[in-house]
Amino acid sequence: MGLIISTMYRRYWPVRGVKFMSYSNAVLQDNEAVLDIRDFNAVSDTGLSRVINIPVPYLKRHYKDIDKRYIYILGSDKAGCNLTARFLKKKGFKIKGSLIINQDNKRNVSHKWREAL
């Protein structure tokens, strides 16, 4: 029973200090990075060039490839963003916010962040 509660907490309970943001509120500075945690095949057509793509299953092996300490998490669902935020906070990263991207707003993200990314 405790294992089920622990799993549910890590996936679905919001992470303290990490808010889900809209694309218009996210302003990318030079010391910040965008970490895309979606699968490699979902990322290929977004048109974003300055995004680090590390899917959730590869995060434990490749989190050291992230050179910035302030991160926006770009994911396809809240559960993946929560898992990633918890893991990276334990490793000392500062999570600025989480952004959800899906098929409906993919073009909106590329348009809003094209200049910054």
Image: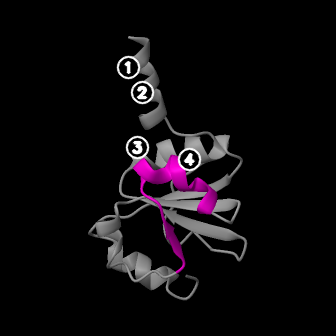
Give whichever of discs 1 and 3 has the lower sequence position: 1
Residue 17 in sight in this render:
no
Q: CA distance from mark 2 to mark 3?
A: 11 Å
Crowding at dot 4, Cα within 10 Å, few <14 / some 14-19 / many 20+, comes out as: many
Read off the residue under disc 2: 7
- Going by the numbered disc 4, the residue's amino acid type is Ala
Q: Do residues under tags 2 and 3 come within 8 Å of each other at their CB atoms?
A: no
Label 1 sits on residue? 4
| Label 3, label 4: how far apart the Cα atoms are | 10 Å
Q: Are marks 2 and 1 in contact (CB under 8 Å)?
A: yes
Identity, as a three-letter code, of the amino acid under mark 2:
Thr
| Residue that protrudes farthest toward the front in the picture | 61
Q: Residue at x 38, y 11 (%)?
A: 1
Residue range (magenta)? 50-65
Q: Earlier in the sequence, mark 2 or mark 4?
A: 2
What's under tag 3, amino acid-wise? Ala
> Pointers 3 and 4 in contact (CB under 8 A)?
no
In this rendered view, identify the residue nearer to me: 19 or 61.
Answer: 61
CA gap between label 1 and label 3 equals: 15 Å
Q: Is 52 in front, or is 98? A: 52
* Mark 1 to mark 4 CA distance (whole Å): 20 Å
